[in-house]
Structure formats: C-alpha cells, structure tokens
C-alpha cells in the first residue's frame, strides 16, 4: 500500500484550533478507506518559530518539504508579532511560488443547512469553482518608493503576467469547465482600467478558448462581477481570475454562500514536481483566536481535497473525499454548528461530529 507523507503546518491563530479537527476527519476517512497517511508536524509560524528565530521558516525549508507529497496548512498571520506582508511572503506565498503551485482551486457551494445572506436562494443555486492564478499577477514584490516621508513621495507596485503563467491557468480552467455539466466559464477582467495586463489576459483567454468550442465563456469586469456574485450567483460555474481578483472573489463567494468558515482550497502543482498545499480560504482570524469557536469545516473539507489529489483519480480516494463532504453536509443539516452559522458549538464538537459521521 502507498504511504502518503504529508507535512502538517497548523500555523497561527485559529489555524492551531482547526487543524486538530482537520486531522481527526482525515484519519477517520483514511482508516475507513484503507489509505495510509504519515503526518509530520512543523511549527513554522509567527507565534513560535518567528519569535525564536526571527524568520518564518528555516533556510532549507524547500529541501525539507520536498520529502512530502502534500502540505496540510492551517493559517498564517499574527500581526502583533510579524507584519502581515512579511509573514505571508515568507510562508504561504513562498510555498505557492517556490513549489510552483500555480492553480488555486476554491469550490464555492451553498450547502444544505447553511443560511445564506442572499434572499430566495436554495441549495444548488450557488455551485461554482473559482480558479485563481497563484504564482504571479498582482502579487509581486517588485516596485519601490522614493522621496519617503515628503510630499513628493512616490510608490510603485508592479504586476507580472507571463504567457506561460496566464495560459496554464486558463487551460486548467477550461479543462475543468469541460468536466462540469454546464460547461460554462467566466473570466474576471478589468481591461478598461488596467490597460496593459488585462487586455493581455483577455487576448490569451480568447486564444485558449479556441481549443474548447464546447465551453460557453465570457469575460466580465471585476466590479460588475462582484455585484453579480451577490445578485445572481447562479449564473457562475467556473470562474477564472488573476491572483488578486481570485483572492477577492474567493472570499466574496463563500460569504454569499453563508460563511467563509466552510470554504476550502487546493494550491496545486498539477504536474506534481513539487508538493501541493491544502488550506482553508480563511486566515488566522486573530479576533476569534483562542476562543475555541472557529468553524473547522474549511480545514476538514481541504483535507478531503487533499485525499482526492493524493489518489490521482483512484476511486477509493474519491470515495474518501466524498465521505468527508457527505459527513460535512449531514452535520450542517442536523449537527452542532459554530457561531458563524448561528450555532453555539465549539470547534472540537463540530470536528468530532463530522469524524463520527464519516464512520
Ligand atoms: N489559510 C489561508 C491563510 O492563512 N490566508 C492568509 C492570507 O492573508 N492569505 C492571502 C492570500 O491567500 O493571498
């Protein structure tokens, strides 16, 4: 039997609270479906590691992590100790870029038992896959500032869009659309304002789309697209977006579907040259950290996505994934809920209920 080595990094804030529940569900599903997982825990985060070492990770982090197929990641960020742009760039963004995890896949679904803030929406009305470009775009460290502290101060932030980077995320998104019943794709753009990068994004979308005549696709400016997420979420199936637009849409989508507390994600290097990373969409949430009330479902669902990825299409792993998602659904309908879902349960109670529903 294949033994899958995974690196487990709970990280900061509520990451530490939701990770034990992510592991509990993962172990329950792995044991039920005969999947062997070997987990190694790493304390690379702001609160402990940075405070001790003055950096987020050891210098040889990439060499160490290459021994693992996947990274199971909680959340990063503890602004009282480390400024957010440092903790993010020296941890999560270092993984995404260093391990070429160029696809950030973020499913958004209205789940049974979850109240949506949108009027007259029912299960099935929101069911989309956000495909976020994950290694370039607006997320760069390039730029600079001059005349600091004077009224002539100038700040420049660059963005990077490469043919390889744009084409590969578009291709992944069109391939994904081909596997879905509606075969519908929306590309997020802003070519009327960002006059260089977004016309290029649109040009490449038109080009890549030629290989997918069965996919109905359109492009929508990010401003009206965000409005339509709220007003007409049922019109979206696969949504492909640059790094920043994808980040924004994948917080907005889950908020429309009830709570960001259940939104999972997979940061993938589809070629498997490097470890891929699975994490909740939410961050470390310092405002509720330490209270034991964080919703563990996003972490648990991310573990399901990891199992599916580890299985490379194998039916047993797909069944393990489906069993976790079914357990989440049954607990959302009639089990304990955390306060973000108007419940009174704590993180552990929800995690235990899901693990026991997996069986
Ligand atoms: N689990 C996700 C996490 O820790 N996110 C922190 C964050 O600020 N992420 C920004 C991003 O994904 O670009």
Image: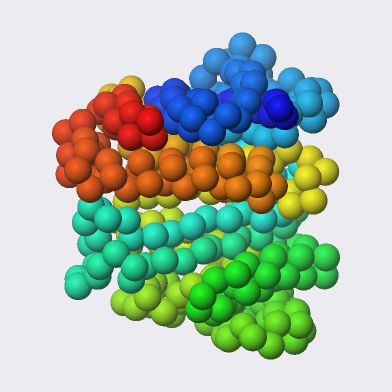
Q: What residue is rendered at 61% in x and 54% in y?
A: 104
Task: Name the quadrant of the C terminus.
Answer: top left
Q: What residue is rendered at 63% in x and 74% in y?
A: 178
Give the x, y percent position of residue 110. 33, 60
Q: Does residue 45 lie above or below 272 as drawn?
A: above
Residue furthest top as drawn: 52
Q: What residue is rendered at 51% in x and 75% in y?
A: 181
Does residue 125 appear in the picture of this structure? Answer: yes
Q: Nearer the viewer, residue 287 or 43?
A: 43
Give the x, y percent position of residue 336. 21, 35
Q: Nearer the viewer, residue 174 or 155?
A: 174
Q: What residue is rendered at 51% in x and 63% in y?
A: 129
Number of labels in the image equals 0
* Residue 11 in the figure: left or right of residue 215: left
Give the x, y percent position of residue 149. 60, 47
Does residue 140 appear in the picture of this structure? Answer: no
> How is colour applied across the structure in the image?
rainbow
Q: Nearer the viewer, residue 4 or 290?
A: 4
Quarter of the image holding residue 112?
bottom left
* Residue 46 in the figure: left or right of residue 202: left
* Residue 257 in the figure: left or right of residue 116: right
Task: Name the quadrant of the N terminus.
Answer: top right
Give the x, y percent position of residue 19. 46, 27
Q: Does residue 71 lie above or below 312 as drawn?
A: above
Quarter of the image holding residue 344?
top left
């Amino acid at each position: 039997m294949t033994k899958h080595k995974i690196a487990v990094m709970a990280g900061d804030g509520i990451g530490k609270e939701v990770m034990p529940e992510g592991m509990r569900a993962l172990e329950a599903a792995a044991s039920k479906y005969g999947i062997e997982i070997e987990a190694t825990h790493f304390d690379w985060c702001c609160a402990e590691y940075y405070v001790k070492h003055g950096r987020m990770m050891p210098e040889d982090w990439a060499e160490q992590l290459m021994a693992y197929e996947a990274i199971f990641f909680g959340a990063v960020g503890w602004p009282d100790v480390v400024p957010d742009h440092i903790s993010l760039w020296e941890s999560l963004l270092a993984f995404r870029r260093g391990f070429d995890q160029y696809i950030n896949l973020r499913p958004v679904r209205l789940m049974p038992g979850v109240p949506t803030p949108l009027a007259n929406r029912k299960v099935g009305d929101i069911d989309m896959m956000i495909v976020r470009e994950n290694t370039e775009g607006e997320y760069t460290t390039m730029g600079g500032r001059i005349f600091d502290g004077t009224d002539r101060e100038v700040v420049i932030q660059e963005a990077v869009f490469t043919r390889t980077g744009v084409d590969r995320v578009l291709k992944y998104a069109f391939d994904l659309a081909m596997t879905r019943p509606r075969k519908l794709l929306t590309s997020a753009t802003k070519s009327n304002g960002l006059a260089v990068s977004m016309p290029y994004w649109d040009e490449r979308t038109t080009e890549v789309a030629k290989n997918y005549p069965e996919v109905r696709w359109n492009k929508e400016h990010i401003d009206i697209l965000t409005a339509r997420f709220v007003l007409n979420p049922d019109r979206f199936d696969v949504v492909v977006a640059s790094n920043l637009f994808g980040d924004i849409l994948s917080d907005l989508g889950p908020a429309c579907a009830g709570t960001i507390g259940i939104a999972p994600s997979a940061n993938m290097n589809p070629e498997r040259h490097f470890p891929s990373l699975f994490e909740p969409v939410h961050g470390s949430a310092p405002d509720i950290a330490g209270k034991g009330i964080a919703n563990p479902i996003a972490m648990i669902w991310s573990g399901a996505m990891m199992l599916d990825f580890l299985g490379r299409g194998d039916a047993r792993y797909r069944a393990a994934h489906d069993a976790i998602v079914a357990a989440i659904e049954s607990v959302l309908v009639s089990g304990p809920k955390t306060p973000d879902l108007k419940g009174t349960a704590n993180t552990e109670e929800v995690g235990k209920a899901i693990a026991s529903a997996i069986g």
